[in-house]
Amino acid sequence: MEGVCKELESEGLTFSTQIIKGSDLIQRFTVRCPNSGVMIEFIERNEEEGFSEKNVEDLFRQLEASDSY
């Protein structure tokens, strides 16, 4: 995830969050497209578990801090 994000940032992609790490899930979100409002989620799963409460809390904390929510 980190390598992919660094490469995308070097190409000009802007992220609205840092990498969000849970026990079995890693996520990162782009800024919203000003024309469409689309936000892209990059996700890496290591197990079949769903989203953890920690991931969701961290996501919303970061989005609120960047005024992206």
Image (cartoon, grey):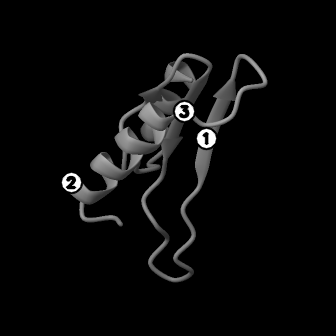
Crowd around label 2: few <14 · some 14–19 · many ≥20 (10 Å): few
Q: Are marks 2 and 3 in contact (CB under 8 Å)?
A: no
* Mark 1: few/some/many CA within 10 Å (<14, 14-19, 20+): some
**Label 2 belongs to which residue?**
65
- Residue at 72% x, 26% y is 49
Inter-mark Cα distance, 2 to 3: 20 Å
| Residue 32 placement (x, y as % from top left) | 46, 67
Using the image as rendered, state which of residue 38 and residue 5 is in the foreground: 38
Q: Mark 3: few, some, or many residues within 10 Å (few <14, many ≥20)?
A: some
Is 5 on the left or on the right of 47, as rendered? left
Three-letter amino acid code at the position of disc 1: Phe
- The amino acid on which the numbered mark 3 sits, given as a three-letter code, is Ser
Please, is residue 9 above or below residue 32 in the view? above
> Where residue 58 sits: x, y (%)?
36, 39
- Residue on which the image places disc 1: 42
Q: Nearer the viewer, residue 16 or 6?
A: 16
54 to 62, vertically: above or below: above
- State the residue at coordinates (49%, 71%): 33
- Mark 3 or mark 2, which is nearer the start of the sequence? 3
Residue under the point 59% across and 55% down:
40
The residue under label 3 is: 52
SS class, disc 1: strand
Residue most extreme to the front: 53
